[in-house]
Image (tube, rainbow, N blue to C red):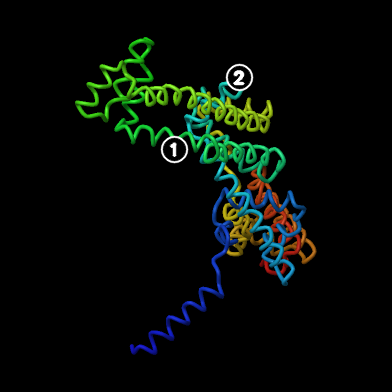
Amino acid sequence: MGMMDKYRKRAEEKEKDAATPPPHGLTFAEIKQDREKSHLFLLLLKQNGHKDLATRIAERKVAGAADVQLIEKQRKIFAEKMVQSEKVEKFLTKENMVSLARNHPNFEAIVNAGSEQAIRAIKNHLREISITDESKFNAVVESLKIHDDYENGGEYKELDQRVDKLCKDNGITSQEYFDALDTQDPIEKKKALQKLASKSYGEFRKALDWISGGSLSEGTLKSLQNSQDSMENQIEELNKRKGDIGSALFLTITSDKAEAMLNAVYNEESPEKPKSGFLDAQKDSTLDEVQLQKEWKAKKAMMGHANYNQLNKTERDVVKEQFLKEQDEKYEKKNKGKGGWHDFFAAVIKSLLDLYDKDKLE
C-alpha cells in the first residue's frame, strides 16, 4: 500500500470516527440482553409514562422516527442514572457501610446481619430508587458530592499536602509519625516526636539541639504536634459529611424494606428476587407454532380421531377455541407473578392467541 493509499485510509477512519461517536452508556440491544438492566429500563419507561412504548417493544412493533427518538431519549436518561448509581455504589464499601450504620440502629442491624449480602441488597435498592424515587436518590448523590468535594479540596486537601511535606522535609515516614502519635504516655509521646523533629539533623546539629534543650527543632516539634490536632479536626468534619450520606441513605429504606432485607440475610436467601429480564420474558412468551400444532394433535388423539372427525365445522371450532383458551391459560400461568417484562409479553401472546386463525389447526 502506497503513501497516498495509507493517507486516504487514515483520513477515512478519522471521518468515520467523527461521524459515528460511541453511544453514552449501554446500547438498547445491550440493555435488552442484560437481565437487571432490562428490568430497570422497564421501570424507567413505566415511571416516565411510556408503558405503551414498552408494549410496542414487546410486540416488536417499534416503528417510525418518533418511537426511535423516544427510545434513544430514555436510553440516555437511563445511562445517566446508572452512572450516578455507580458513583454511590463505589462509596459503599464494607468499611464505609459499617461506619455509616453506626448512627442508625435499624440500618446497623442490616449490615451486621451479613454485610456482603446487605451491601448487594442496598446497591440493588439504590439502582431502583434512582428511577422510582428520584428525589430521595438525588439526596444521597448530593450528600456524597459534598463529602467528596470536602475530601478532595479546600482545607482537608491543603492539610494533607502540608503534613506530607512536613514529614518529607524532615525525613519522617508516615508510619514513624503515626507510631509516635499513637504513644499513650504524654511524656513519652513528646520524646518520640522530638526525636522525629531532629531526625534529619547531622550528628553535630543533633548535639547542638540537645545542648540547647531542643531549641533548634522546636518549630518542627510544634508543627508535628499541631498537625495531629488539625488532622483530627478535619477527620471529624469529614465524618460529619459521611454521616449525612448515611442519613440520606437511611431515609430511602422503608421499615418494610428493612425488614425484608433482614429476613433475607438471616435466612440466607438472596437479598433481592431475581429480576424479570427482557430476554427471559421473551423466551417464556414466544408462541411456538410447531409446539402448538404438536399439542393440538395430542388433544385430538385424547379425544379420538374418529370422534373428532365426526364433528361438524361448528363443533370443531368450539373444540379449537377451547384448545386456544387452554393455551392462553398455560402461558398466563407460566408468566404469573414474574412481573416486569413478563406482564407485557403475556399480553402480547394473549393477543396472538385471541386472533389466531383456527383454520391452521387441522
- Classify residue 31 as left or right of residue 202: right
| Quadrant location of the C terminus in the rendered image | bottom right
Secondary structure, mark 1, is: helix
Seen at 31% across and 24% down, the residue is 196
Residue type pointed to by label 1: Gln
**How far from the left and from the top, in percent, is residue 48?**
75, 52
Q: In terms of depth relative to the viewer, which is nearer, 46 or 7? A: 7
Image quadrant of residue 202? top left
- Image height check: is 86 above or below 163? below
Q: Pick the residue in front: 126 or 264.
A: 126
Q: Quadrant of the N terminus?
A: bottom left
User: Up-down: is 100 above or below 278?
Assistant: above
Q: Which residue is mark 2?
A: 105
The percent coordinates of residue 342 (x first, y second) are: 65, 50
User: Which of 55/128 is in front?
Assistant: 128
Q: CA distance from mark 2 to mark 1?
A: 37 Å
* Residue appearing at x 64%, y 42% in the figure: 128
Q: What crowding class fits label 1: few (fewer than 14 Cα within 10 Å), some (14-19), or many (20 or more)?
A: few
Q: Position of residue 109 (x, y in %)?
A: 56, 21
Tell me the amino acid under the disc marked 2: Pro
Q: Which mark is residue 161?
A: 1
